[in-house]
Image (cartoon, grey):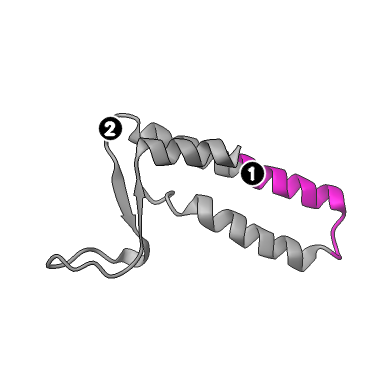
Amino acid sequence: MHITALPVFIPLFVSALLVAIRHFSPRVLNDGIATGVGLTVVTLCALLLAHTAHGHPFAYWLGGWRPSHSVTIGISFSVDAVGAGLAAFSSS
């Protein structure tokens, strides 16, 4: 599932963008963007929770890396129901 990395990437990217435009945009716009990002992250975490709710955890390998011959190089996100639920709870 390719949305696995988005709850981490979107807030980091948008926060850098907000820092870059803070002198050119009104505070109300910045607050609206931050609220939209928060709602997006909650929605993405809820989708991950719904995907793992049937007891089928999965691993998402960033950058296309895959385990080969019992050797794992790279970064993986392992998503299970408890982790996705806690991510949705903490992002709300």
* Horizontal and vertical percent position of residue 78: 34, 50
Give the side of residue 91 with respect to residue 26, left or right: left
* Horizontal and vertical percent position of residue 69: 12, 67
Q: In the rendered structure, which amino acid carries the disc numbered 1?
A: Gly
The dot on residue 23 is none
Give the side of residue 19 with respect to residue 26, left or right: left
By secondary structure, the bulk of the magenta-drawn segment is best described as helix
* 28 versus 61 height, above or below: above
Judge whether residue 32 is colored magenta: yes
Q: In the rendered structure, which amino acid carries the disc numbered 2?
A: Gly
Q: Residue at x 69, y 63 (%)?
A: 17
In terms of image quadrants, where is residue 55?
Answer: top left
Q: Residue at x 52, y 50 (%)?
A: 7
Q: Residue at x 72, y 49 (%)?
A: 33
What is the span of residues highlighted in magenta in the rendered image? 23-39
Judge whether residue 13 is colored magenta: no
* Horizontal and vertical percent position of residue 29: 81, 50
Residue 45 in view, yes or no: no
Dot 2: few (<14), some (14–19), or many (≥20) neighbours within 10 Å?
few
SS at mark 2? loop
Give the side of residue 29 with respect to residue 17, left or right: right
Residue position marked by numbered label 1 in the rendering: 38
Residue position marked by numbered label 2 in the rendering: 55
